[in-house]
Image: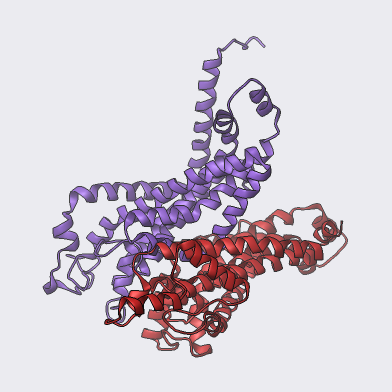
Chain colours: A red, B purple
Amino acid sequence: MTRYIVRRLLLMIPVLICVTFVVYFLMDLAPGDVISQLAPADATPQQIEMLREEYGLNGTIIERYGRYLWRLLHGDMGTSFFLKRPVFSVFLERLPNTLMLAFASILVAILISLPLGIAAATHHRSWLDGFSVVLSMLSVSMPAFWLGLLLIFIFSLHWKIFPSGGSEGLKYLILPALTLGTEQAGNLTRITRSSMLDVIHQDYLRTARAKGVSEKKVIRHHALRNALIPIITVLGSTLGNAFGGAVAIETVFAWNGIGRLTVMAINNRDMTLATGCIFMFTLMLNMTLLVVDIAYAYVDPRVKARYSK
Amino acid sequence: MSEHRKISASELKQYKKRSLLSEVWRNYKKNPSAMIALFIVIAIVVIAIVSQFAFDYKADIVQQNVREKFIHPCAEHPFGTDNYGRDVLVRVLYGARYSLSVGVVAVAISCILGVTLGLIAGYYGGFIEDFILRFCEIFTGIPSILMGVALISAFGQSIIVLMMAIGLVYTPMYCRTTRAAVMPVRDEEYIEAARIAGVSDLKIMFSHVMPNALSPIIVQVTMGVASAILTASSLSFLGLGVPIPLPEWGAMLSEGREFMRDHMYLTIFPGLAIMITVLSFNLMGDGLRDALDPKLKE
């Protein structure tokens, strides 16, 4: 198991480096010179050259990227051009908001989709099943930012229960978490339903029932545990994507998360900030996926047995 | 036994082709929601084509008419008019072309790239496969929307760039699907036989290996159009997709958002248009999956 984890961590390194290269290179391709925007209007060519050196933007793209990577490997993510602060501290400042939204939305998604998916599978072809299918289809087809706008209209403009935007506290979290959670719930319900349906007709369930295990226990211990692996997989990637992929929802609710920060950095041609944010995001996503893979071993003894071989 | 008769190879081929298609269609027809979805998609395609001739871009789509601004939905303007007095219904209908073309072209790009890469990875295996898979991993490590934003900021904001950005973002998905479908047949005897017979690798890949991957790819293409349309509309919503004043649905939503308090209909109708389109493609994909592989249906 430890060997497996170490191997996975080592494999992450080249991927992360390539991600920084792709982002850095794309940002470099973008039209517009950052230095000419940063420099005062009456700057002499020498001053501009000095600024360029100060920001590490002199030389060819390979030289620049090389310097960036060298510093990154030493734990220095550089300074944001526009905020004039270390990238890492800017990132850390936004991190709690991002984590809060990601986990709250996943909680909403789980609360909706696990009961619904399980009920749909145990009551296969009933009205409940149909309801779950329709609901999950709608939720994966609806633009999430549109749902967010509808919620704002109902709950903050019409009924004035929740604020329409900002990220100052729990009250501000509810609407974005509901929006993002509903979006994620669609996929999760589908997976829960189909993987429960897969196991529900297995012989070991019939055996369990035959020996007199209560229906509740059959579903919870025998069916759900066996159906859990695909559910956890989807949960992991959903959570991973919520760390940086919920840009539109963050924008709708003026939520100060990493997604919005990254888009702002890209739009400002703030190379270090954009590359740093995407680097951290990819790291978080990969770590989540690794945790998911490790979680398999705890959920399913068969997987654990495979590792110990 | 008496019914046995000899048929030529070409006849057999024709017969097989017809039966496969007709069987899929027969299965597909049984699914009412998939059939409704198919009709809606056809209707949207017709709208996208007809709106080209029915409306004049300058006069009906971008022409501002401030005297008629913010007319709420009524008989004359069923969807109302926007802040520049433009008819929202006409703009929504005209906007069908953008979502549809972005969805279809983006999927075509990612399908061509992804299927080719997936075929190569699955067929050759080894070092090449590792390389391609790692390459895919880099792109899946970045959320599609951020990657889209980065690509658009690098290459400028236009509908072509939007198509290419979304196409690139979804390429790894097709690559993986294809590879997964190709892998089990890589060592089949008929592949080996073809190789011994001197058939070129390229021909083996496309005419012997690829047909095995066809059903998952077809399903993914249909659903891919749905997710491409969604991604495109979020990018437009962020102000990075189709440049204004083109009536792209996501961009219309983003414009209407400012006037949400008093004129909610401005955000409702473009959003509904996106949802109905995406929903139809998703339902079609579901129907196709069941039709292509009845075994999968529970």
Q: Point out the image quarter for the N terminus of chain B.
A: top right
From the viewer's perspective, tell me whether residue B52 is left or right of residue A100: left
Q: Quadrant of residue A51?
A: bottom left
Q: Quadrant of residue A279?
A: bottom right
**Residue B53 on image: x %, y %:** 19, 48
Seen from the viewer's position, the closer of residues B127 and A171 is: B127
Seen from the viewer's position, the closer of residues B25 and A46 is: A46
From the viewer's perspective, tell me whether residue B209 is left or right of residue A37: right
Farthest left residue? Answer: B67
- Residue A127 appears anywhere in the view: no
**Residue A78 on image: x %, y %:** 52, 77
**Residue B297 on image: x %, y %:** 61, 47
- Residue B106 appears anywhere in the view: yes
Q: How many marks?
A: 0
| Up-down relation of residue B104 to residue B209 (above or below) | below
Residue shown at 35% from the left, 46% from the top = B42
| Up-down relation of residue B7 to residue A177 (above or below) | above
Residue shown at 17% from the left, 73% from the top = B69
Seen from the viewer's position, the closer of residues A241 and B99 is: A241
From the viewer's perspective, tell me whether residue B66 is left or right of residue B244: left
| Up-down relation of residue A49 to residue B36 (above or below) | below
**Residue B222 on image: x %, y %:** 47, 48
Seen from the viewer's position, the closer of residues A86 and A293 is: A86
